[in-house]
Amino acid sequence: MINTDYIELKSELTSQARIVITAHKSPDGDAVGSSLGLYHMLRFAGIRDVRVVLPDSVPQYLDWMPGSNEIITHENNAVEAERFLSEADVIFCLDYSALSRSGALKKTIQASKATIVNIDHHQEPEDFANYAIVDTQASSTAELVYDFLQRLDLGVELPPSAGTCLYTGIVTDTGSFKYSSTRPRTLEIAARLMDSGVKPAEIYDKSFDNNKLSKLKLQGYVLSEKLEIWSDYNTAVINLTKDELDKFDYEKGDTEGLVNYGLSVSGIVLSVFIKQSDEGYFKMSFRSKGKVNVNTIARSYFEGGGHINAAGGRSNLPLEETLRKLKNILPLYEKELHGAF
Ligand SMILES: [Mn+2]
C-alpha cells in the first residue's frame, strides 16, 4: 500500500529512529549522491542513527564525496550491512524501481519490518514500498530527494555537505544538464543548491577531471579500434571483452560514459555499449535520442530496463550471438531510428 502522507512519514523520522539508506548495485553519481545527500541532511537534523548501506563499492571517481568513507557495503562487510538493514525502523530505497536492483541487499530488505520509502525516477516502478516518491519525469533521484526534504521540512537548512552530494547526483545523471530529462525544476534546484554554498566548478573538477591515465588510454583504444557504426540503423556499438579490459588495468567505473561517445557521432540516435563481466556474461548500456525508446528494448530483449533514453541490460549469449541478436531487433525500431525527432 503506497502512502504519500509526509506528516505521517515525518513522525517516523524521530531522533531515535534507526535509518538505513540504500541505492542500486554498481552505484553511479546519482545513487551515491542522493544517498549521501539524504544522509547528511538527516544527520544535520539531529537523527543520530543513519547509515548508508550499498550492495557494492563506490567507484573511484566518486570517492571524494563527503561521507563516502562512511558507507557500508555488502561487498566488503556483509554481516554489518545485513545487521543494520534488519534492525532498521526506516529503509530508504533510492534510485531503483525494482528490489532486484538492490542486489545482495534484496533478501534482507524483503524480510525487514521497517517502513520502506522508495524515491526514484526510473520507468515502470514496482510496488514494494510503504511510501513511494516516484516521478519518472525527474532528471535524477537527487532532484527528488531535494524536493522531498523541502516538503518534509525538518526545520534546518540543507548543509553544504548535503548540497554537494545532491548537486553531484544531478550533474552526473543529466550529463552536466544536457540530457532531455533536464527540466526547469532541475535548474531551479541547482540554483538553490548554489545559494546554499555548493561549488559547481569544484564538483565538476573532482567528478570528471580526475581520471587515471589507464582509463583515458582505454577510452582512446575504444575510440580508435572498437567504435562501430551500423549506418543502416543510425546506431553505434562498442564491445569490450574481459581480456581487453584487463589489458588496460580496468577498475570499476573506468568505462563509465563510454556509451555516450557513440551517441556523439553525427546522425547516431542509438548507442549500445557491451562489456563482459567478471562472470563472463555481457552487460549492456543503451543510450538514445528522441523517440528511440531503449527502456523497451532493454526490457523486452535484454533482461533490463531504465529510462526512455538511457537503460541497462544483460546478455548471457556469447558476444557474436549478442551482436547478432541486437542486429536482428533493430529493424523492429526502424521508424524511430530514422525519425527520432
Ligand atoms: Mn538516477
Image: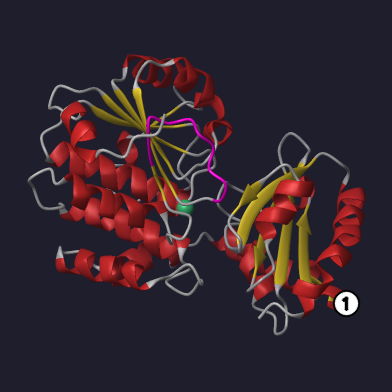
**Residue 91 lies in the magenta stretch:** no
Identify which residue is drawn at 12% across, 27% down. Answer: 15
Does the rendering let one see residue 312? yes
Q: Which residue is mark 1?
A: 232
The type of residue carrying mark 1 is: Asp
In the image, 151 versus 111, the foreground residue is: 151
Give the left or right position of residue 38, taking residue 269 as reference: left
In the image, 43 versus 280, the foreground residue is: 43
Give the left or right position of residue 191, taking residue 218 as reference: left
In the image, 170 versus 292, the foreground residue is: 292
Mark 1 crowd level (few <14, some 14–19, many ≥20, 10 Å Cα):
few
Quadrant of image for the C terminus: bottom right
Q: Could you tell me residue 273's position as x and y percent? A: 71, 59
Q: Could you tell me residue 148's position as x and y percent? A: 27, 48
Give the left or right position of residue 58, taking residue 157 as reference: right
* Residues shaded magenta: 123-132
Identify which residue is drawn at 92% across, 52% down. Answer: 320
Quadrant of image for the N terminus: top left
